[in-house]
Image (cartoon, rainbow, N blue to C red):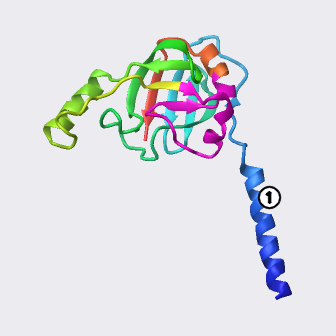
Amino acid sequence: MKTRFSILLASILLLIISYSFYSGHRTATIRRTKSLDSSFYIIVDKSDFELRVYDAEGWYATYPVVFGSKDPGDKMREGDKKTPNGSFKIILKKIHKQWGQELLLDYPTQENIKLFNERKAKGIIPANAKIGAGIAIHATRPQEEWTVDNFYNWTDGCVSVKYSEMKDLFNYIPVGTKVTIQP
């Protein structure tokens, strides 16, 4: 009985230590020297929950992110909470009233519209479905950075970066930056 209790206690203690070690360790990693050519591009990898920034010299920064749905598949229609796959551009930088800095993407692109119409024609999505819009890279709310640490997908299809790290990304990424979102 005493041995079982000791094993149980040790297991619980190990679990607590493991959780506390992991919890909160999803932070941005940044190469602090920028190339002279300030053209950046972004790759969002949904399977790794990462947004990676590249410049003329290669990798520049990695930010942990979350999305709208656990399903890494392509956005099918408005309201499905999926983050679209594809190639996009940042078309606007603005401050959103709920989550601060936001980089608006040009979703839907012509390619997204083509796929949407093909899916409608094949009956994959309802005939009255809408494609949606307003997909962006934006921050969490200030007190909700835990969503990123815990891989909690909460958006309506956007890419969400920690509030404390979005300010940095927002400051150096210009309008026109290419963004690739992949499953």
Q: What quarter of the picture does the C terminus occupy?
A: top left
Residue 66 falls left or right of residue 28: left
Residue 138 falls left or right of residue 131: right
Residue 112, image x, y percentages = 29, 28
In the figure, 13 relative to 99: above or below? below
| Residue at 45%, 43% in the rendered image | 69
**What's under tag 1, amino acid-wise?**
Ile
Report which quarter residue 10 is drawn in. Answer: bottom right
Residue that mark 1 sits on: 17
Residue 141 in the magenta stretch? The answer is yes
Q: What quarter of the picture does the N terminus occupy?
A: bottom right
| Residue at 68%, 41% in the rendered image | 26
Report which quarter residue 53 is drawn in. Answer: top right
Q: Which residues are magenta?
A: 138-166
Residue 156 in the magenta stretch? The answer is yes
Q: Residue furthest bottom?
A: 1
Residue 182, image x, y percentages = 43, 37
Residue 132 falls left or right of residue 95: left
Report which quarter residue 3 is drawn in. Answer: bottom right
In the figure, 155 relative to 87: above or below? below
Badge 1 crowding class, 10 Å Cα cut-off, few under 14, some 14 to 19, many 20 or more, is few
Which residue is nearer to you in this view: 73 or 60? 73
In the figure, 94 relative to 24: above or below? above
Residue 100, image x, y percentages = 60, 20
